[in-house]
Image: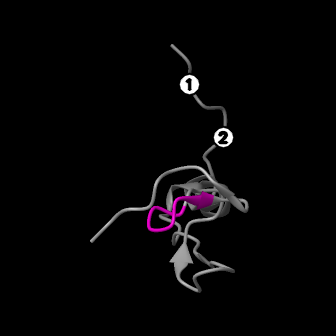
């Protein structure tokens, strides 16, 4: 059975656990509509992605 040779310090334990924290999702302002959207995602309202029409826009 594997047994640690030394006790893990609080600092090393904290470095390892720092990746477990939840990150706030990033949003960018759309150039055309001015609304917030996720980067590298299709804008669902307009259907545009990188200046091209990918999807048909949703109708209200």
At a point 53% along the width and 79% down the height, the residue shown is 36
Q: Is residue 1 above or below residue 54?
A: above
Q: Is residue 56 above or below residue 11?
A: above
What is the secondary structure assignment of the residue under circle 1? loop
21 falls in the magenta region: no
Taking depth in this image into account, of 14 and 51 the one nearest to the observer is 51
Q: Is residue 58 left or right of residue 19?
A: left
- Label 2 vs label 1: CA separation? 9 Å
Q: Is residue 31 left or right of residue 44?
A: right
Looking at the rendering, in which quadrant would you find the C terminus? bottom left
Q: How is the image coloured?
A: one colour
Q: Quadrant of residue 13?
A: bottom right
| Residue 19 percent across, percent down from the top left | 59, 56
Q: What secondary structure prevails in the magenta region?
A: loop
Q: What label sits on residue 6 in the rendered view? A: 2
The residue carrying pointer 2 sits among few (fewer than 14), some (14 to 19) or many (20 or more) residues within 10 Å by Cα, namely few
The residue carrying pointer 1 sits among few (fewer than 14), some (14 to 19) or many (20 or more) residues within 10 Å by Cα, namely few
| Residue 22 percent across, percent down from the top left | 47, 64
The region drawn magenta spans 43-48
Which residue lies most toward the left here? 60
| Residue 7 percent across, percent down from the top left | 61, 46
| Residue 55 percent across, percent down from the top left | 51, 50
Taking depth in this image into account, of 55 and 17 the one nearest to the observer is 55
**Circle 1 residue:** 3
């Amino acid at each position: 059975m594997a047994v640690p040779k030394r006790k893990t310090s609080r600092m090393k334990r904290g470095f390892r656990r720092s990746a477990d924290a939840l990150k706030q999702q990033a949003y960018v302002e759309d150039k055309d509509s001015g609304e917030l959207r996720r980067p590298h995602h299709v804008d669902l309202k307009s259907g545009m992605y990188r200046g091209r029409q990918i999807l048909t826009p949703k109708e209200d």
